[in-house]
Image (cartoon, rainbow, N blue to C red):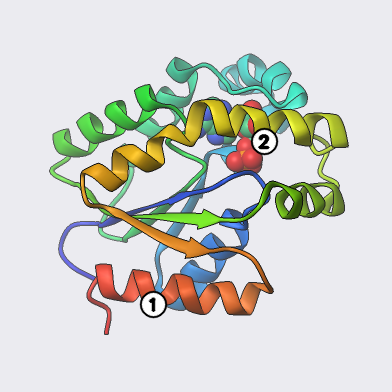
Amino acid sequence: MGDKPRVVVLLGAPGAGKGTQGMRLTARAQIAHVSTGDLFRDAVRMQSPAGQRAEAYLTSGQLVPDQVVLQLVEEYLAKLETLDICLDGFPRTYQQAIALEELLSQLGLSIALVLHLHVADSIALERLVDRGRADDTIETARHRLEVYHAATEPLIRHYNEVGLLSEVDGSGDADAVESRVWDAVEMALNLR
Ligand code: AMP
């Protein structure tokens, strides 16, 4: 761990395994795992102002408006100390990506690595329906995948162009994916 937190972004469709791999990174390397989806689900449960604004979007599988997401992330990042972090489910739009870069640069931080966990839609869909969270009915799962392709997938090209992207095959069991993820993270964060 360095003096300043380093930021790893986990990019991938819903069902690609970002949550599972984020938690594994935490267990393995003391990298804090921040899932905006989890933050929103907690906010909805608590019925906080952000939760009330986000609830209908979560239920229908739509993206929460950028402004609401950014406020939540900003509050979270402001509390960061020295632990490296992995962002799961954020950024999800080009506007969020630009806002994240601005926010990090204000804090003197930058993205060390963007991992694209890649799986076929059929695998993502199967995993989403199997895990059966309230926002994962077959209809919302399909819709969430469409939203991913339209709004989030273009970020892959953006991060590739700026030289931060690492492609990781997210198919197969979680242990196999973990070792691929770990190879990329170890190298980018100099953990070897
Ligand atoms: P997830 O657990 O990452 O699949 O997120 C669950 C839901 O939370 C999404 O379907 C969105 O409604 C909302 N959400 C999470 N992260 C974001 C984000 N970065 N931008 C917009 N909406 C988000």
**Of 171 and 103, the residue lying toward us:** 171
The residue type indicated by label 2 comes to Leu
Q: Name the residue that disc number 1 marks.
A: 183
Does residue 81 appear in this view? Answer: yes
The span from disc 2 to disc 1 (Cα, nearest Å) is 27 Å
Circle 2: element type: helix
- At label 1, counting other C-alpha atoms closer than 10 Å, the crowd grade (few under 14, some 14-19, many 20 or more) is few
Q: Name the residue that disc number 2 marks.
A: 145
Query: Which quarter of the rendered picture does the C terminus lie within?
Result: bottom left
**Of 121 and 53, the residue lying toward us:** 121
- At label 2, counting other C-alpha atoms closer than 10 Å, the crowd grade (few under 14, some 14-19, many 20 or more) is many
Q: Quadrant of ligand 1?
A: top right
In the image: residue 19, left or right of residue 117: right
Residue 163: give x, y in percent of width and height. Answer: 22, 51
Instruction: Residue at 77% x, 36% y: name it.
Output: 141
Residue 24: give x, y in percent of width and height. Answer: 54, 70
Circle 1: element type: helix
Residue 87: give x, y in percent of width and height. Answer: 43, 48
Q: Is residue 80 above or below residue 74?
A: below
Instruction: Residue at 62% x, 79% y: name it.
Output: 175
Query: Which quarter of the rendered picture does the N terminus lie within?
Result: bottom left
Q: In this view, does 147 lie above or below 168?
A: above
Instruction: Residue at 68% x, 20% y: name it.
Output: 57
Does residue 42 appear in this view? Answer: no
Location of residue 167 (image quadrant): bottom left
The numbered disc on residue 171 is none
Location of residue 101 (image quadrant): top left
Q: Is residue 62 above or below residue 169?
A: above
Residue 82: give x, y in percent of width and height. Answer: 25, 59
The residue type indicated by label 1 comes to Asp
